[in-house]
Amino acid sequence: MPYWHILTLLNSQSPVREPSVTEVKSELQSILASREFVQSKGLSKLLRYICSKSLMEESEPITEYTIAVDVLGKPHDFKENKDASVRVEVHRLRKRLSDFYQHEGAGHRVRIHIPTGHYSPQFLFAEQEAVVLESESAAVDAPVPTVAPPVIPLELAVSPAPLPVAPQRRNSRRTIAWILAAAALLVALRLAIRPEDSIDRVWSPILTAPGTVLLCIGDRAGGHHPALTHADASQMTLLDYHDLQSQSVLMDDAATLTRFAGLLQSKGKGYRVVSQTEATFADLQGGPAVLIGLANNDWTQQLVGKLRFWVEHKEPGQLILRDRQHPERADWAMDYATPYLDITKDYALVMRVLDPRTGQMVISAAGISAFGTISAGNFLTNADELKKIEAVAPRGWKKMNFELVLSTEVIRGKSGHANIVASHFW
């Protein structure tokens, strides 16, 4: 491929579509079931490992050390410069994938490619892989220049017109070799590197789970009144229906709901909305869920009741977030008898957990009051806010359950940004 074609591709403003997570998982399963891999448990385990970590978009890179410890069972004092086993196994895996795509997988549109000298895979379409392979081959075969190349203006570099004839033919070839090698490297990087998205890192278990997401919003019934039955409805006027507590939600909770709906829609994930009174256990078993509200959402209270951070109704109108590891603590509290404009601080529970009762992933934005809920909703849908988790999270947290206690300042009925004051990962 002429070098100017590579540069034109590199500088194109049109986005390069990548295979979806579903497409990559399907391709991975096809590879693992193929003749090339079915008899090699070691290479299958290695391929599954690097693909799974890449799909989860782990912040820590896939390295020689992590493969040695996590896949090959090496001790934690493994030294890369004294043991080449990882490099050998990755080379074997790279060769096995090449053989697979030359034979059994020749007609596959989605490709899993491991760039030379790297451990993280690329997920490409066949035509993209062809460009990358040709670029890698050209970069390897290109002569190594012995002098620094001249600087070429970008408008000349991207033009398909012939380059000016250099005074010496030898230096012209060196210049082209440099451009070709640099272009090949940049193309490979552009196709391989996906910018980290803190929203995807938190929401991935919800976004990749099968089924639509249940957006379960708290209502004024607070989970203490049964859902409306057909018998009740037959005796009810439209005005009675509109006055039901189960049909009334707080504006701040509704605003939080719209944030979540917008996020899911932007990610192409289906969802449906239901109030906590109308939601059933079967609804929660049917797919991942997002719970909005704490004191007014019985499903949230049931879930947190067995976690480290939970809510206590000390007296009517007085709520306290409790820490089982520090039961003496009682300052994460709210008294609902406090004048509205005198509230200066609120707290919220943000969770991402696998609910043991339903077997489904759940995320919550659960403030002690509406101020905390709307602040938690902003936290969970704002990429910059979610980066705060990195400061308190352990390594590998993206595959863990977690529970966060957030605090937010409240000024004359308006809540601000959230800060993490306590956390638990498991």
Image (cartoon, rainbow, N blue to C red):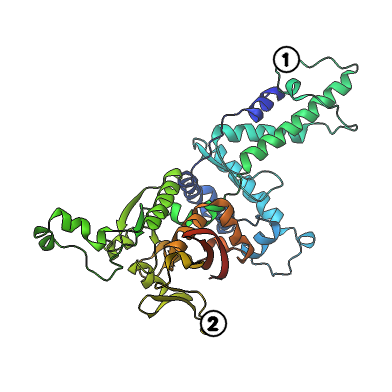
Which residue occupies 45% across, 52% down? 207
Camera-side residue: 410 or 298?
A: 410
- Let me know if residue 307 appears in the view: no
Per the image, the residue denoted by label 2 is 326
- Which tag, 2 or 1, sits closer to the chain's start? 1
Circle nearer the viewer, 2 or 1: 2
Residue drawn at x 38%, y 68% as measured from the top left: 300
Pointer 1: what residue?
161
Q: Please, what is the three-letter code of the amino acid marked with disc 1?
A: Ala
Q: Position of residue 41 (x, y in %)?
A: 55, 58
Q: Would residue 130 be found to the left or right of residue 231 on screen?
A: right
Q: Residue 321 in the image: state x and y as whole percent.
A: 47, 75
Specify whether 109 is left or right of 186. left
Quadrant housing residue 338: bottom left
Left or right of 392: which side holds 363? left
Q: Residue at x 72, y 31 (%)?
A: 183
